[in-house]
Image (cartoon, helix red, strand yellow):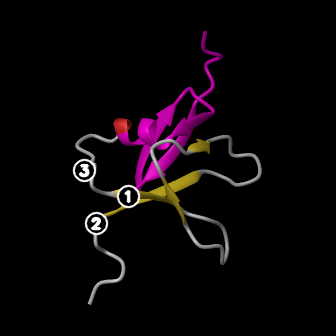
Amino acid sequence: MSNGHKYHFFVDTQRYETEKASLTGAEIKAMIPGFNPMYQLYLEQPGEEPDKPVSDGDTISLDPAGHGVRKLYSVPPATFGGQ
C-alpha cells in the first residue's frame, strides 16, 4: 500500500516521478519512453566525484536526504575513447 509520498528524479532534463524510494537501473530505463537499450545511464555525482555508470541491477536511492534530487543522463555507445 502506498503512503502517497512521491519521489522524483531527472533523466536528460526530463522529470520522472515514482512512489518508490529507490529504483534499479532497469526500472528507471523502463520509465523512459523509447529508451535505447544500447545507451548507458550515468548518475551525476556531487562536486568533483566522477559520475557513476548505472547498470540494470544497480539500485539508486531517490530519497533526497543527503544528496538532493537525483539526476541521471544517457550516453550513446562508443561516446568515450573515440577519435
Check disc 1: other Cα within 10 Å, few if <14, some if 14-19, many if 20+: some
Q: Nearer the viewer, residue 3 or 52?
A: 52
Q: Which residues are magenta?
A: 1-29
Residue placed at 25% from the left, 50% from the top? Answer: 36
Question: Looking at numbered disc 1 in the image, what kind of residue is underneath it?
Answer: Gln
Q: Residue at x 58, y 52 (%)?
A: 70
Q: Which mark is residue 40?
A: 1
C-alpha span from label 1 to label 3 = 9 Å
Q: Which residue is mark 2?
A: 77
Sequence order check, earlier mark of 2 and 1: 1
The x and y percentages for residue 10 are 47, 50
Q: In the image, is 71 to the left or to the right of 83?
A: right
Q: Amino acid at mark 3?
A: Asn
On screen, 4 above or below 32? above
Residue 8, how many percent across, how many down? 54, 40
Three-letter code, disc 2: Pro
For the residues labelled 2 and 3, the Cα–Cα distance comes to 10 Å
Where 66 sits versus 16, above or below?
A: below
The C terminus - image quarter: bottom left
- Which dot, 2 or 3, sits closer to the camera? 2
Return the residue found at the far top. 1
- Please state, as top left, top right, bottom left or bottom right, where the N terminus lies in the image: top right
59 sits to left or right of 77: right
Report if the CB atoms under discs 2 and 1 are less than 8 Å apart.
Answer: yes
Does 2 appear above or below 65?
above
Label whose residue precedes the other's in the sequence (2 or 3): 3
Count residues near mark 2 (Cα–Cα under 10 Å), then give few for <14, some for 14-19, many for 20+.
few
Callout 3: SS? loop
